[in-house]
Image (cartoon, rainbow, N blue to C red):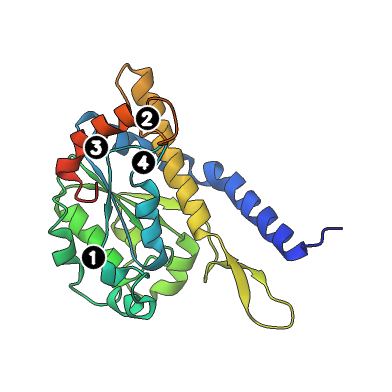
């Protein structure tokens, strides 16, 4: 018998959810890979945006060993958690916050915008998806269909705006494990699953590009042989269009 039953149950639950991702998102993953592949071949960019904890998904893809160099994180301090988590919850619900943020990120029809929002209803993320559509970018949402439908209460969801929806399957409230003797729950899954979905799409695109004879723009870990030369070339290529490099 395990000494850590709740930890074991959480990991088993997360593993089971991961195992269902391809079955439940097969068409959406293929569509997302098609969109990102088109963007890569057009020398476009993949912008990634989320608020609160979802913003970490943008940083997950940024300058990532084994990741695609065409990714650009959309980062705005008031919408993140490192300098005011409580305030960020207020800002992500305020209309109009997004427009000045996206002035720094000139999306075009050649680009993809990935919106990460577990609840899928916060004003900032919905308006970001709408702005991306208005600029002609392909909008991909990583969200929980179940949670967003429960939370919407008549409001527009990111999933309603996006061209492609990747469903992370997270339950309402995100937490999956009950805490004995209370009504509380722990064990969120949206970040782990969201990162897996996103990286699955990027891996598919990289394989397609290389198989066709095109060089996939992939960063190497700094401690791998040849990394300095490879990464310097990629940074030189993308830094003029990625303010965070």
- Secondary element type, mark 4: helix
Using a 10 Å C-alpha cutoff, classify the residue at mark 1 as few (fewer than 14 neighbours), some (14 to 19) or many (20 or more): many
Q: Marks 3 and 1, Cα distance to the nearest angstrom?
A: 30 Å
Residue visible at 33% across and 68% down in the picture: 80
* Rendered residue at 18%/39% (across/down): 110
Residue neighbourhood size for the residue with mark 2, other residues' Cα within 10 Å, grouped as few (<14), some (14–19), many (≥20): some
Residue occupying image coordinates x 69% and y 76%: 179
Q: Nearer the viewer, residue 59 or 20?
A: 59
Foreground disc of the pair 2, 3? 2
Mark 4 crowd level (few <14, some 14–19, many ≥20, 10 Å Cα): many
Residue ID for mark 4 = 32
Q: Earlier in the sequence, mark 1 or mark 2?
A: 1
67 lies left or right of 106:
right
Q: Residues within 10 Å of mark 3 (few under 14, many from 20)?
A: some
> How far apart are the two marked residues, 3 and 4, measured between alpha carbons?
25 Å
**Label drawn at residue 91:** none
At numbered mark 3, what does the secondary structure look like: helix, strand or loop? helix
Q: Could you say which quadrant of the image residue 29 lies in?
A: top left
What residue sits right under mark 2 in the picture? 227
Tell me residue 104's x, y (percent): 14, 56
Marks 3, 4: nearer the viewer: 3
* Residue 127 disc label: 1
Work out whether mark 2 precedes mark 3 in sequence or the reverse, and give the earlier one.
2
Let me know if residue 109 appears in the view.
no
Q: CA distance from mark 1 to mark 2?
A: 38 Å
- Of marks 3 and 1, which one's residue comes earlier in the chain? 1
- Foreground tag (3 vs 1): 3
**Residue 136 appears in the picture as rendered:** yes
């Amino acid at each position: 018998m395990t000494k850590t039953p709740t930890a074991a149950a959480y990991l088993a639950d997360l593993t089971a959810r991961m195992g269902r991702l391809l079955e439940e998102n097969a068409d959406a993953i293929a569509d997302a890979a098609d969109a990102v592949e088109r963007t890569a071949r057009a020398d476009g960019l993949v912008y990634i945006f989320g608020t609160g904890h979802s913003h970490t998904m943008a940083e997950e893809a940024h300058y990532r060993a084994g990741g695609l160099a065409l990714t650009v994180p959309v980062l705005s301090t008031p919408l993140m958690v490192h300098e005011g988590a409580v305030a960020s919850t207020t800002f992500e619900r305020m209309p109009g916050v997004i427009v000045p943020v996206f002035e720094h990120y000139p999306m075009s029809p050649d680009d993809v915008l990935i919106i990460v929002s577990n609840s899928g209803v916060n004003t900032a993320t919905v308006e970001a998806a709408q702005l991306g559509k208005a600029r002609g970018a392909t909008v991909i949402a990583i969200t929980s269909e179940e949670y967003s439908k429960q939370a919407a209460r008549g409001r527009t969801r990111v999933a309603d705006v996006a061209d492609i929806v990747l469903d992370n399957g997270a339950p309402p409230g995100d937490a999956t494990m009950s805490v004995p003797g209370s009504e509380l729950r722990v064990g969120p899954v949206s970040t782990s699953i969201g990162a897996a979905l996103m990286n699955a799409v990027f891996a598919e695109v990289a394989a397609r590009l290389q198989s066709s004879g095109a060089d996939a723009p992939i960063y190497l870990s700094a401690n791998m042989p040849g990394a300095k030369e490879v990464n310097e070339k990629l940074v030189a290529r993308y830094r003029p269009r990625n303010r965070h490099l």
